[in-house]
Amino acid sequence: MLQLLRAAKATAALDGRDFVLPDDVVSVAESVLAHRIILDRKAAGAGETPHSVIRGILSRLPVNQDPVNSPAPPAGLRRNH
């Protein structure tokens, strides 16, 4: 998970931000995590791939697409601007 955080921070930095958005995490998650997925025979036989498993998980996560109008983060998790 540390590498996922580092990759998301790098993505944010390349976009000129000093904070990470959920979209930054989503954009790198597949590349960072896919090599950690080991499929069982049933999943492999059904045509699943590690990448498709990650995409399926990400598609079910609620990600706020509007960071400007998002609610304030909980205490202790405030963004540093």
Image (spheres, grey):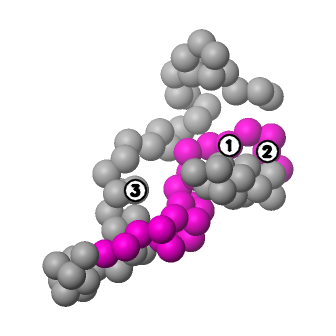
Residue 55: assigned label:
none
The amino acid sitting under disc 3 is Leu
Magenta stretch: dominant secondary structure = helix
Q: Which residue type does callout 1 highlight?
A: Val
Q: Is residue 34 magenta?
A: yes
For badge 2, the amino acid type reads Arg
Of marks 2 and 1, the one in the foreground: 1
Instruction: Work out whether residue 68 or residue 49 is closer to the camera in this orientation and state it.
Output: 49
Q: Residue at x 25, y 76 (%)?
A: 40
Q: Which residue is mark 1?
A: 20
At a point 51% along the width and 64% down the height, the residue shown is 33
Quick check: can you spot residue 73?
yes
Q: Which residue is mark 2?
A: 17
Q: Residue at x 40, y 65 (%)?
A: 54
Q: Are marks 2 and 1 in contact (CB under 8 Å)?
A: yes
Instruction: Using the numbered discs, state the Cα–Cα distance from disc 1 to disc 3 in whole angstroms.
Output: 17 Å
Find residue 28 and report its horizontal and vertical position in percent.
59, 62
> Height in image: 45 above or below 70?
below
> How far across and how far down the image is residue 76, in percent?
64, 16
> With respect to residue 70, does 32 lie above or below?
below
Q: Quadrant of the C terminus?
A: top right
**What SS does tag 3 mark?**
helix
Q: Which residue is mark 3?
A: 58
Instruction: Report x, y in % for residue 44.
Output: 25, 83
The answer to which quarter of the image holds residue 41 is bottom left
Q: Secondary structure at mark 1?
A: loop
